[in-house]
Image (cartoon, rainbow, N blue to C red):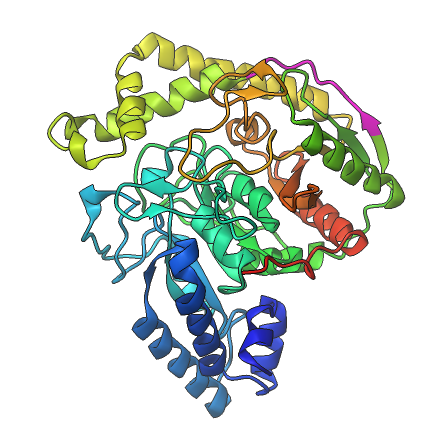
Amino acid sequence: MSGGDLAWCSALEAVALIQRKEVSPVELTEATLARIEALNPRLNAFCLVAADLARAAAREAEIAVTKGEPLGPLHGVPISIKDVVFTRGLRTTGGSRLFAEAVPEEDAVAVARLRAAGAVILGKTNTSEFGHKAVTDNPMFGVTRNPWNLDLTPGGSSGGAAAAVASGLGPLALGTDGGGSVRIPAAFCGVYGFKPSRGRVPQYPGFPGWDHVAHTGPITRTVRDAALVLDVIAGGDDRDRDSLPREAGSYLAACDRAVRGLNVGWAPDLGYAVVDPRVQALCADAAAEFESLGCHVEVVNPGWESPEEAFGTIVAAQFYAAWSDRLPEAEALMDPTLVKFIRRGGGVTTRDYLLAIARVGTYWQEVHTFLARFDLLLTPTVAVPPFAAGASPPREISGQRVPVLGWMPFTYPFNLTGQPAASVPAGWTEDGLPVGLQIVGGRLADGVVLAASAAYEAARPWGERCPRL
């Protein structure tokens, strides 16, 4: 198999090839590293390529195959890790010059599990500084670009991860999602992004600031690859007291569950969002596919108020607590938008913070009550198509002024509720830009979201469509 063919192998295909000894882990890793070397200078998806470490891990994986040793579920498969996720012995900066030479002494729980499963870590992917904004640029490593149009952003803050996967720079990427940071770049890059239920993947250790909303999840080209990763990284760890015990069964097997008869709500705007007509049309068409899959689809308006103020208050206050002691001395080293966000947090009173937490509790009750009627909720993932790289997100959509998070009104609400949510490709605009459909499940219903995602993928496969780089 040629290096070009290997670049577009799914992880499941790669595992099978390695187990049958038709492809070696060394061959697969070398093909991926060669593609990174060729394309990353234009994309800036990777901020660190750990070529020597990847080759060493691939050689060890090859020896295990040759000796007939037991192989892990990701044995020899290349994976990238977002630069906010701690990696033992491998520089982890959080996209910040404050941590330019930081090398953690221990892995994040998810990374340790990936290593134990046999995955080969390629390096670290670019992010915004500490993931504070949903685009991908920072003063240390610069701007990451969208493989479908290099003038545009891949979204963020896991934009490097999504750009890498969409470009064939490895089949798997590990991202984080505090307000949409897995789902937004998946939508903008035409790939699959899965935010598990809060607590499904332990959050330890890591950079502070994302309490109550943090999730870790995969970005992949296929749904089953994401399920395969989740099978490896999910399950409780007492170092994260909010982590959930491992569920019985396999997430990969959940992809084969029937979806016929599910009750599905399609919410075009959640009652408060302004959506670009191109996005609206593609997502409405994608949502209609669930009728063909045997689901009962109903157009709904939940009537919820936007939780943007509560979300912004909570995260800004937490960022202030985490990073304000760096100001003003280190201000010149930091992204100006991060400095502004930290200072905003300084204006949040204890009362403001506790009222915002209480508002989230009330919001959850509203969501839970409404969704008692439905197995799934569908929305657009992002309200707009990809916009210019390095630019501020739009504050106007279809001629209407929108709030700061008005371009991403569908993702962060489900960080507040902790529900599982995924982004699948809904289609491409006339000028070739990807648009995502968000699939939201009930509390702890990760398997239902994966089953729905897999059924949709089978009905409307997207894997054959790749950016021309």
Q: Say which quarter of the image contains residue 306.
A: top right
Q: Taking 123 as reference, is 64 above or below it?
A: below
Q: Which residue corresponds to the image point at 41% horizontal and 48% vertical from the top-left?
A: 144
Count of number-bearing discs: 0
Return the x and y of residue 161 as percentages of the image width and height: 46, 52
Q: Is residue 330 magenta?
A: no
Q: Eyeballing the image, is 385 above or below 126?
A: above
Q: Nearer the viewer, residue 431 or 221?
A: 431
| Residue 156 appears left or right of 379 | left
The residue sitting at 50% across, 25% down in the picture is 394
Reply yes or no: does residue 302 show up in magenta.
Answer: yes
User: Majority secondary structure of the magenta segment?
Assistant: loop
Residue 75 locus on image (x, y percent): 50, 74
Residue 221 occupies quadrant = bottom right
Image vertical order of residue 59 relative to residue 195, above or below: below
* First to last magenta residue range: 298-306
Query: Residue 169 location in percent, x, y?
Result: 49, 64
Q: Quadrant of the N terminus?
A: bottom right
**Residue 72 appears left or right of 329:** right
- Residue 341 visible within the image: yes
Q: Nearer the viewer, residue 17 or 274?
A: 274
Front-most of residues 23 and 202: 23
Rendered residue at 83%/37% (across/down)? 288
Answer yes or no: is residue 375 visible.
no
Q: Is residue 261 above or below residue 276?
A: below
Answer with left or right where residue 388 lies relative to residue 335: right
Task: State the residue at coordinates (46%, 63%).
Answer: 79
Residue lying at the far bottom of the rendered structure: 67
